[in-house]
Image (cartoon, rainbow, N blue to C red):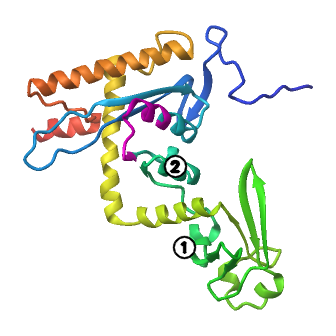
Amino acid sequence: MSTLQGSPHLRIASPYDTDTRWSAKGDMFWNGFKLHVTETCTAAAEGQRTVPNLITDVATTASTVPDVKALEPIHRRQHRRGVLPGEHYLDSGYAGADAIVTARTRGVALITPVLLDQSRQAREKAGFDAANFTIDWKYQQVTCPLGQTSSSWSPCLQHGRPMTVVKFTRSTCGPCPARAQCTTGKAGYRQLTLHPKTMTDALRTARAEQAGRDWQKDYALRSGVEGTIRQAVAVTGSRRARYRGLARTHLEHVYSAVALNLIRLHAWWHGKPLDRRRTSHLARLELTLAA
């Protein structure tokens, strides 16, 4: 028996449209593209009239392109068009240490939940995770919570990205009274894998900030874009492409965004509320019974 396997982004999914690709997200499985929508979300100051939130950018990518890979082209296009935001609220799919650092060079603060530390110690909230270790970037040394220093500092490439592997010695970790809280590995010593300094600092700062209530309250503003996505689906039928090819489908998405902006402006000019929130079937039934 022989098999043939290729990368999903190279594998043709349809003989009618060679640009489409099969992809999955959660329980959704589709053949097509991805649509990325950016809209304003600035609240009106006290005493001022509320302004409509308008779509400022739409991006259409192959469905196999990770969200985080689509962010930099979006920011480049927004910068070129003069609509680059000072704060960009995103879901976790766009988060990443390199994305945070790159956006910061453009003057954009990413408000997005970053991936938490996936080590055993962090997941179980028991023992010493990477945040408990002090990093001395100048002298290329890491100090553990009990004051012991690392023995090796090895820059390397992992999946094409620069990383640094830091190791402690078996003679240091073996007799340590807190070894069980630090590592249970068969090697008998602790090892850390670090991003470059700017990325490590960005990740640690972002993880610390998103643990606070103020950050959670601020991030709730992003939920408004879910109403935009629902409006795009319900009003313009954005989930089903009317044309073939990435370029034509993107043009369709641009037309849809223009139509939604005109609808919002019309409602604003005439003083009509524009409710974009979604009410579930269960919520509607509850409201009916209450009435």
Q: Which residues are magenta?
A: 75-88
Q: Is residue 6 above or below residue 242?
A: below
**Do the residues bearing badges 1 and 2 touch, measured as CB atoms within 8 Å?**
no
- The image quadrant that residue 82 belongs to is top left
Is 123 within the magenta? no
* In this view, 6 is above or below 196: above
Which mark is drawn over residue 162? none
- Work out whether residue 188 or residue 41 is closer to the camera in this orientation and state it: 41
The kind of residue tagged 2 is Ala
Q: Quadrant of residue 280?
A: top left
The residue that label 1 is drawn on is: 125
Q: Quadrant of the N terminus?
A: top right
Is disc 1 placed on a helix, strand or loop? Answer: loop
Circle 2 crowding by C-alpha within 10 Å: few under 14, some 14–19, many from 20: many
Q: Which residue is mark 2?
A: 95
Relative side of 113 to 173, left or right: left
Residue 11 falls left or right of residue 221: right
**In-front residue for pair 263/105:** 105
Which amino acid, mark 1?
Lys
Residue 218, percent from left and from top: 31, 55
Residue 203 is situated, as x and y percent measured from the top left of the image, at: 54, 61
- Kindly report which numbered mark, 1 or 2, lies closer to the viewer in this rendering: 2
